[in-house]
Amino acid sequence: MIRPDIVDHWSEVQMHLPAGFELAALVASGRPAFDLFAALAAQTEQEGEVSVRIDEGTGERLILRLVIRRESPEQAQAEQERLLKAAKKRGKKTDPRSLEAAKYILLLTSLPSNIFPPVDVLALYRFRWQLELAFKRMKSLTGLEDWRPRSRNSLAPGSTPGLSSS
């Protein structure tokens, strides 16, 4: 269930981390380097989080939360099979770390944990992803994904985008 007060705060930073995401900039609290796979192995609950920070070399640190959700065995297997198929199609080998990371949903957020527990962050992301898919579908149905202006004048005030003025 999504709480209405959470939806108002969605402008915060959220990012879905793909399986091959380079986490070199992340640093776990109190440790010199962040070990994603150690964090995943330590995940005992269905949902959890790890406090991390990004050191950009400027002296400023951005404190973030890595929200972790363990996928069901069926979902994990389907994602692993998708990765293997995509690698085979490209003539590449799948990195074993990608296969391990495929067992989880990983979200990076700056939302405060006292207001947004991991389960709410995950619910918000699922909701946002459904909106993204709806927009993608609408663009596909209306042909807007292929829309390109034919000339600079087609974007002039009072003109109809995508229609020729001739």
Image: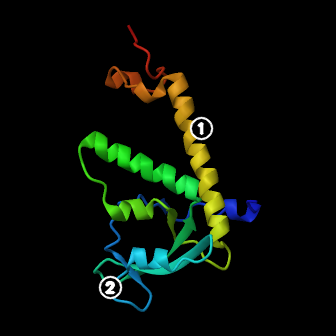
The C terminus is located in which quarter?
top left
| Residue 72 falls left or right of residue 165 | right
Q: Dividing the picture into quarters, in which one does residue 100 lie?
A: bottom left
Note whether 48 is above or below 77 in the view shown. below
Residue furthest top in the image: 166
**Marks 1 & 2, CB-CB < 8 Å contact:** no
Q: Which residue is mark 2?
A: 59
- The residue at 43%/48% (across/down) is 81
Q: Dividing the picture into quarters, in which one does residue 113 lie?
A: bottom right
| Colour scheme employed for the rendering of this structure | rainbow
Label 1 or label 2, whichever comes before in sequence order: 2
| Secondary structure under the numbered disc 2 in the rendered image | loop
Given residues 85 and 22, the one toward you in this image is 85
Q: Amino acid at mark 1?
A: Ala
| Residue 10 falls left or right of residue 96 | right
The N terminus is located in which quarter?
bottom right
Q: Which residue is mark 1?
A: 134
| Residue 98 falls left or right of residue 121 | left
Q: Amino acid at mark 2?
A: Gly
Instruction: Calculate the distance from the C-alpha at mark 1 to the C-alpha at mark 2.
Output: 41 Å
Given residues 140 and 103, the one toward you in this image is 103
- The residue at 37%/25% (across/down) is 148
Residue furthest left in the image: 91
Residue 12: % across, % down: 55, 65
Note whether 57 is above or below 3 in the view shown. below
Task: Give the mark count.
Answer: 2
Q: State whether residue 21 appears in this view.
A: no
- The residue at 59%/57% (across/down) is 125
